[in-house]
Image (cartoon, rainbow, N blue to C red):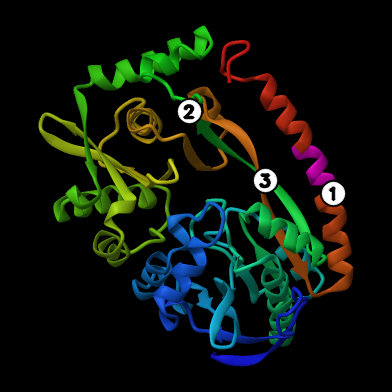
């Protein structure tokens, strides 16, 4: 699908007036140094937007045309230099996105219209906020938004959805007339400026009932004879990765779904991005029984809870593997934030607090765009009230952050 056209955008004084738009069939068709160089120029880049991560999704058969994610990366060039780029996918379903538009698709179908294919600018299967519109400056970012919308119109897709965007992306999309949608995630923040002295010091900041609950849950796991081994980066062995995948796939199948990610994807992570991963392995009687995989950026001081699975059932093991072990590790390592992923009010009981996340949307059909705009306004008012309600239920002691 490699294509080329001119994208006109506002430029700062002294610069040219045109960008060349090129569409590529995925990250693998782009130079890693070009893409990663642009990513590192963004505020708060995440490892999930790295060329290695996106290319692994494609090459492993996890996010490709066969699974309903046809890559069509839109890029802007000037004088042979990559000025802006985004990961775009043409989709025939809404799985693996975590910003739900099933009701929109149903409304289209009820009116005899096709909602699919649609275009999605996102990291597949990864509800992590961060930059999606990689650009060297605000002018290039604004031009990229316009170029993507123009491409979507030319392709005849029903809509465009930019998911879990950064603040810079949000502003650019809003300025371009796209509709914004708010959702809620739950993130943990370490005490500032020096961080907690340890897990018990962290617990001391919580209300008595929350401290008691967490200690009870951790005690149940310990009394069941479960201990944890932590493997970081290159120290995660091939046997560890293989065991983790057994757990990950088993948990998906227990819920009646095939796993989104293939063994080849994780093999590529072990080969190309080992430093980005921390594995927490639960063991009982010397045998591994469960695992959770966390991504991290030590320089940024952020960790992300991503994948988990278990081969045996132990009461409260999920909480220990996915929250308490990673939080304890973050405190010990001096990281300042742990993001727990999409949804889940239960995370508040583990001191992950609600934060707003944003997506941006464009619909080609004018009447449906108006209807969705009204819906998003009402939904946004509800989100505001929901956040106020959640803040009133803070697990922290009065006066603690």
Residue reaching furthest to the top: 208
Viewer-nearest residue: 95 or 121: 121
**Quadrant of the image for the C terminus?**
top right
Q: What is the x, y in percent for residue 386?
A: 73, 32
User: Which span of residues is magenta-colored?
Assistant: 378-383
- Residue occupying the point 42% across, 21% down: 196
Q: Residue 142's x, y, as percent?
A: 73, 70
Q: Is residue 331 magenta?
A: no
| Residue marked by disc 1 | 377
- Residue 240 locus on image (x, y percent): 18, 49
Residue 380 counted in the magenta span: yes
Give 112 or 178, whichever is nearer the viewer: 178
Whether residue 164 is visible:
yes
For marks 3 and 1, the one nearer the N-term is 3
Decide if residue 73 is in sight here.
no
Q: CA distance from mark 3 to mark 2?
A: 23 Å
Q: Secondary structure at mark 1?
A: helix
CA distance separating discs 3 and 1 = 13 Å
> Quadrant location of the N terminus?
bottom right
Residue identified by numbered label 2: 190
Rendered image: mark on residue 78: none
Position of residue 273 measured from the top left corner of the image (x, y, whole percent) = 31, 60
Identify the element where label 2 is drawn: loop
Query: Residue at the spot x=48%, y=28% of the render?
Result: 190
Q: Would you place residue 325 above or below residue 74 in this image? A: above
């Amino acid at each position: 699908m490699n294509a080329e056209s001119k994208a006109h955008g506002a430029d700062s004084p002294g610069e040219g007036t045109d960008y060349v738009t090129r569409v590529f069939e995925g990250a693998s068709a782009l130079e890693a140094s070009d893409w990663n160089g642009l990513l590192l120029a963004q505020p708060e880049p995440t490892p999930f937007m790295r060329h290695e991560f996106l290319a692994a999704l494609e090459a492993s058969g996890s996010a490709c045309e066969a699974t309903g994610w046809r890559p069509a990366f839109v890029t802007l060039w000037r004088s042979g230099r990559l000025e802006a780029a985004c990961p775009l996918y043409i989709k025939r379903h809404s799985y693996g996105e975590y910003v739900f538009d099933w009701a929109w698709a149903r409304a289209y179908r009820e009116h005899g219209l096709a909602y699919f294919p649609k275009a999605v600018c996102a990291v597949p299967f990864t509800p992590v906020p961060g930059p999606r519109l990689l650009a060297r400056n605000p002018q290039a970012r604004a031009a990229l938004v316009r170029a993507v919308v123009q491409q979507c119109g030319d392709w005849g897709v029903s809509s465009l959805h930019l998911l879990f965007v950064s603040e810079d992306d949000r502003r650019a999309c809003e300025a371009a007339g796209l509709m914004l949608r708010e959702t809620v995630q739950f993130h943990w923040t370490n005490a500032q400026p020096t961080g907690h002295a340890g897990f018990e010091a962290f617990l001391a900041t919580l209300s008595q009932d929350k401290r008691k609950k967490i200690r009870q849950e951790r005690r149940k796991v310990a009394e069941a004879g479960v201990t944890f081994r932590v493997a970081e980066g290159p120290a995660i062995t091939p046997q560890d990765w293989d065991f983790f995948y057994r757990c990950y796939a088993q948990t998906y199948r227990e819920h009646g779904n095939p796993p989104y990610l293939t063994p080849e994807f994780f093999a590529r992570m072990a080969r190309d991005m080992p430093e980005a991963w921390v594995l927490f392995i639960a063991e009982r009687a010397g045998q591994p029984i469960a695992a959770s995989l966390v991504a991290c950026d030590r320089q940024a001081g952020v960790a992300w809870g991503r994948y988990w699975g278990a081969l045996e059932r132990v009461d409260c093991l999920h909480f220990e593997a996915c929250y308490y072990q990673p939080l304890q590790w973050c405190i010990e390592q001096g990281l300042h934030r742990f993001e727990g992923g999409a949804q889940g009010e239960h995370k508040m009981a583990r001191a992950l607090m609600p934060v707003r996340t944003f997506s941006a949307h464009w619909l080609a059909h004018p009447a449906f765009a108006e209807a969705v705009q009204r819906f998003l306004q009402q939904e946004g008012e509800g989100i505001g009230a929901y956040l106020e309600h959640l803040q009133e239920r803070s697990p922290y002691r009065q006066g603690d952050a």
